[in-house]
Amino acid sequence: GNSVTQMEGPVTLSEEAFLTINCTYTATGYPSLFWYVQYPGEGLQLLLKATKADDKGSNKGFEATYRKETTSFHLEKGSVQVSDSAVYFCALKYGNKLVFGAGTILRVKS
Amino acid sequence: DTAVSQTPKYLVTQMGNDKSIKCEQNLGHDTMYWYKQDSKKFLKIMFSYNNKELIINETVPNRFSPKSPDKAHLNLHINSLELGDSAVYFCASSQDAGSHEQYFGPGTRLTVT
């Protein structure tokens, strides 16, 4: 079936550190891929997306590249801030459904 | 202006009770969704409506019944609440069923005692 696997958290970093959150997927066909972010006490927001192989999604300094050969969509940011502390969800879309990974908690310390 | 709103934000109730959660979106979207997020943050779709028609109905106990009076509203009614129903319930909407982006409400934290 279609599924998403994310690295387990929490991930704790110091401000200005480099961030990678790994995400791999299993899917039939070629799904669209997403990263959503959930700030404390809020609903999810779309952070970035990629709809086909080799596409790079980017937003707010975050990037992720759709790698068909490794079925991956890893999230990266060169220099995290305290305000980036949140839960990050990798997701794929097939048909009408969004399938989410388990979420990765990111904590950034000043 | 809140795009997707839910009421109530918190709901504490006893086992066996019946409760409803309401959702409204002012984005003019055709498609709305209900998700359940458990204590480990795992998020799973429950239902989706497109123009008031049910298009996704995951394996959810039939104690849960969605109702869409119009395409701007999607309510969730839960009968005979159980301890395991405690979770955060999120409503979301999208332009249409094929849209890539979904807009989420702030969530309703349901606690069953």
Image: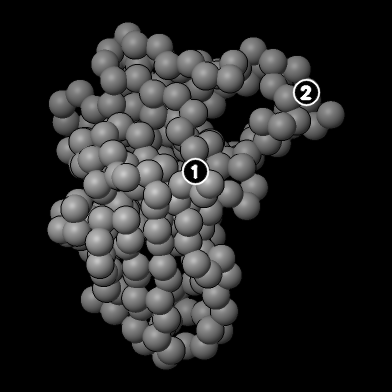
Task: Name the residue tied to disc 2.
Answer: A15
Q: Are marks 1 and 2 in contact (CB under 8 Å)?
A: no
**Can residue B93 be spotted in the picture?**
yes
| Dot 1 and dot 2 within a common chain | yes
Quadrant where the C terminus of chain A is found in the figure? top right
In the image, what residue occupies the spot 41% across and 42% down? B103
For label 1, the SS is strand
Disc number placed over residue B47 in the picture, else none: none
Up-down relation of residue A18 to residue B30 (above or below): above
How many C-alpha atoms fall within 10 Å of the one at disc 1: few (<14), some, or many (≥20)?
A: many
In the image, what residue occupies the spot 47% across and 79% down? B83
Q: What scheme was used to colour the molecule?
A: one colour
Quarter location, residue A52: top left
Task: Name the residue tied to disc 1.
Answer: A44
For label 2, the SS is loop
Residue A6 percent location from the top left of the image = 46, 34
In the image, what residue occupies the spot 28% across and 39% down? B95
**The disc numbered 2 marks a residue on which chain?**
A
Earlier residue among tags 1 and 2: 2
Q: Is residue A91 left or right of residue A78?
A: left
Three-letter amino acid code of the residue under disc 1: Leu
Quadrant where the N terminus of chain A is found in the figure? top left
**The disc numbered 1 marks a residue on which chain?**
A
- Of marks 1 and 2, the one in the foreground: 1
- Give the CA separation, mark 1 to mark 2: 23 Å
In the image, what residue occupies the spot 37% across and 40% down? B102
**Can residue B111 be spotted in the picture?**
no
Residue B99 percent location from the top left of the image = 26, 34
Three-letter amino acid code of the residue under disc 2: Glu
Residue A85 percent location from the top left of the image = 68, 36
Q: Is residue B28 left or right of residue A41?
A: left
Q: Is residue A23 left or right of residue A11?
A: left
